[in-house]
Amino acid sequence: MVTGLSIAASKGEYGGWGHMGGKSCHHGVGHETEDYWGGKKTDMRMGHLAKVLDLTDAQKNAIKAIMKSQHQARSVSHQAMAKHLAELAQLASGSDAYTAKAKIIGALHGEAMSQGLIEHAHAEAQVLALLTLEQMEQYKQMHAEMAEKRAQHMQKHNKKTNHST
């Protein structure tokens, strides 16, 4: 993943060979990904959660605060990674310096991914603590349905990219 990320980030606005997270990623031109708990899609997600779970105003406000905090933490991490990728882009592809920098970025990216997963789990636990038992059951059902859709999407995507047959 780091390879695709570094290639995408170093090859311009529309991503690189892998188009990971670029404006023309595999989801189509114009689709830009955002953090799960923040960014441009926060209001849309919040509206969906509020509707499906019938959240109170107090719950909505508390969840928005959790999402905002999560987004800010991820933003700092993304800025740091962008700086490292910009440094990588200045090096000659395939050089020893490029390889060394890519290894450092890979390790940093792994740490950032790990920390992101931990922060996401912490934020989700905070959200769940705000919900009633009925809302929590609805949330878990919604979460399971989304996980199934993601699995189906990945299975379909993997079939499209299987070049071994």
Image (cartoon, grey):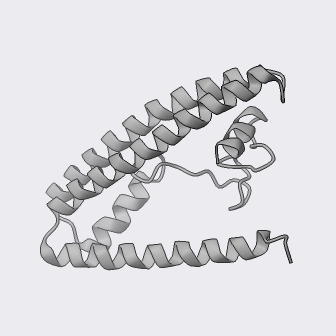
Reply above or below: 106 against 161: above
Q: Which of 110 and 126 is in front in this view?
A: 110
Q: In which quarter of the image is residue 11?
A: top right
Reply above or below: 32 against 165: above
Residue ID at (30%, 75%): 140
* Residue 35 in the image, given as x and y percentages of width and height: 47, 49
Residue ID at (61%, 25%): 84
Reply above or below: 3 against 56: above
Q: In which quarter of the image is residue 48?
A: bottom left
> Is 123 displayed left or right of 134 in the figure?
right
> How many numbered marks, from 0 up?
0
Q: Which of 56 and 120 is in front in this view?
A: 120
- For the C terminus, the quadrant is bottom right
Res. 89 visible in picture: no
> Is 18 displayed left or right of 2 in the figure?
right
Residue ID at (21%, 51%): 61
* Residue 52 in the image, given as x and y percentages of width and height: 31, 74
> Is 55 displayed left or right of 84 in the figure?
left
Q: Which of 164 and 134 is in front in this view?
A: 164
Residue ID at (23%, 78%): 137
* Residue 50 in the image, given as x and y percentages of width and height: 28, 66
